[in-house]
Every structure is written in structure tokens, then in C-alpha cells.
Amino acid sequence: MDLSAYAFDLPEHLIALRPADPQDSARLLVVHGDGRLEDKSVRDLPSLLSAGDMLVFNDTRVIPAALSGVRLARDEKGMDVDVDANLVERVGPATWRTLARPGKRLKPGDTIRFGPDFLAEIKGKAETGEISLEFNVSGESLDAALDAHGAMPLPPYIARRRAADRTDRETYQTSFAGDDAQSVAAPTAGLHFTPRLRAELEAAAITQETVRLHVGLGTFSPLKESQLTSGRLHEEWRRISPEAAERMNAARAAGGRLVPVGTTALRTLESSVDEDGKLMATTGPTDIFLKPGDKLSATDALVTNFHLSESSLFMLVCALMGTDVMQAAYAHAIKHEYRFYSYGDACLLLPRA
């Protein structure tokens, strides 16, 4: 697979470090399947969609997964070492797979102190550099400790330029996030949907449904040769309830469009559809990798942010719209200085007239 077909050059100043204020005031590029482009605002969505359409949101909650601590000295002659850690995946009530720096100075048996009474022991270290951390608290107590000592896990292209702060606790969490805090990255298209905008959509008879996919750090990782060869991505847990599947199928049967908000919602739908195009109740992992040539059965339109060059997510939008159409749309967005990535502007992708 030639990744160069999905490459583009983005000026660094177009990477958004903060969201629009208010967040529903972001710009919206409307991309039609025939290549037509319209410059709009996210607040225009009620007039751009139709009565009976259904927006599908990912209501996962982001945990404050970025931690700073100290690896305690191993003996009296040793020294403490400052450590930055990002939780990746919960593997037990007190245990997480974690990325940490400086990786070369960490080994199994080390203790890291993240707060006065908040400690973790390194239980293992993978060849990839990931470590397994077992905390001294578990379950709800661990959730409370993370809330007290952690910061929002901003994407690398933001974190390299500024540290997370208290403002990100609000702006990097959707207003409709549920109570199951498992994600280590936000479903960022949903960040634009303020309570005001959602009320305006409801008034326009555009219905709203929720599914759930816990977003992992793999969403920011460069594609690996093994993924390109196998046609599968990293696994992420997702769920569609029986009631949600029934409502989405009914909306479509009545002539409405299903419009996922974000690629995580889209991947949840497309990994939960039967041979007849009907959505099924689903719980469990998915590693679906959508790329040009793949058929999308459960998606009639998409609201999404702008994605990284040569990424699986840019390939996904190319699968929906066509690579030439999306390359032209991104060239237009760059020329007209749309803001890119997690805190940036949005697209409404309409593959059919």
C-alpha cells in the first residue's frame, strides 16, 4: 500500500493548540461527493442536515491519564529520577499499560511516586518500551487518585508545544461524556457540540444517539507495516446497546441518514453491521481498518475533524469520499487556513447528493 497517496504538507501554524471559543463557533468545511466545497460554521449544522437525520455520538469519557512523578532511588547511593507517564490501557483494577519517559531508566521492580500517597510499581517492561504499572490503589480509589494527580492526555502534536492545564479538563472532554472513564484520547469531533448546539439540532428534528468506543493512544501512532499488511488496527473496546441499534435502524428505515460524529463513532457502527446493512447490538473489541476500496454500510454522512497525513483516519475519510476529493478538500482547508487536528475545525462529509 502506497502511503504517499494519503500524504499532504501542513504548515505548523495551522495545528490548533486551543479550541475555538465557544467550541461550537469552529469553522466547518462541507465536502460533497462530487467535489463541491462550502465554507460554513459548525453552528450551521442544523440547516445543513435534514429533519429525521440522526447524529451518532461516542459518549466515552477521557481520564486524566497524563502523570508526572519520581522514580524512587533504588538504593542509598542512587538518585531519584523524574518520570512522565501516559496511561494506555487498563488491564486490571489496579494495573495499566503505560508509556513512560525516560524509558531506559525504568525497570521492573522500580517504584514511581505520583503523589504523597499515590505510588505504582513497575511489574513488567515490553520490548516496545511500554511498562506495566500496578498502583497502590484500585477501582474507584484509583480513579479518584488519577483525577487528583493526573492531567488531560493531550495529543503529542499539542503536548510538544504546551503542557495540559485546568482548562483542558473542560475543553478536552465532550459535554455529553458518560460515567465510564476509560479513554486516553477524546473523540474530538464531539468537542464542537455544546449544549446550545445540541438543543438547536433537536429543535430542527435532527435526532441524537450515543454509542461508546474507548479511544486508545494507538489513534495517534504512525501506521505500522504489519497493520498495512494485515488490514487491521490496534484493538479498541466498543459497545452499541440493543436499544440504540433499534433506534438507528428505525431512523434509517424512515428515510433518515445516520451521521456519525467522529471516526470513533463511525468505526463503532461499521464494525457492528450485518450483511444486510442492519446495525447489531455489540460489546467487545474492534480492530477495523477502513481504507479506499472498502464498503461503508452504516454511514450516510460524517462530521469529523481534520486528520494527520498518512494516517489511518485520513484513509478512512478517503474510503468514504474518495482520495482525490479529500486531497482537494484538505488543500482548500490549508489554503484558507482552517485549524487542524484535535482542537481544530471540522468537516461535514456528504458522500451522496
Image: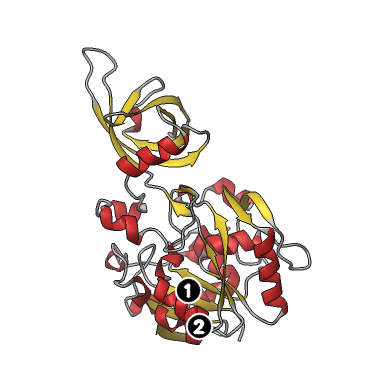
* Mark 2 nearby-residue class (10 Å; few <14, some 14–19, many ≥20): few
Q: Which callout, 1 or 2, points at the residue further toward the start of the chain?
A: 2
Residue 187 position in % (x across, y down): 46, 60
Residue 123 position in % (x across, y down): 45, 24
Residue 222 position in % (x across, y down): 46, 51
For label 2, the SS is: helix
Nearer the observer: mark 1 or 2; the answer is 2
The residue singled out by tag 1 in the image is: 327
Residue 36 can be seen in this image: no
Quarter of the picture containing the C terminus is: bottom right
Relative side of 85 to 241, left or right: left
Residue at position x 43%, y 71% from top?
193
Q: In this rendered view, identify the residue nearer to me: 165 or 117.
A: 117
Q: What's the distance in space between the residues labelled 1 and 2, CA to CA?
A: 34 Å
Q: How many marks?
A: 2
Amino acid at pointer 2: Ala
Residue at position x 49%, y 52% from top?
215
Amino acid at pointer 1: Gln
Residue 310 position in % (x across, y down): 47, 60
The residue singled out by tag 2 in the image is: 203
Rendered position, 266 above or below 108: below
Color scheme of the displayed model: secondary structure
For label 1, the SS is: helix
Q: In this rendered view, identify the residue nearer to me: 93 or 331.
A: 93
Quarter of the picture containing the N terminus is: bottom right
Residue 69 can be seen in this image: yes
- Picture quadrant of residue 119: top left
Furthest toward the top, the residue is 76
- Picture quadrant of residue 22: bottom left
Disc assigned to residue 145? none
Rendered position, 96 above or below 111: below
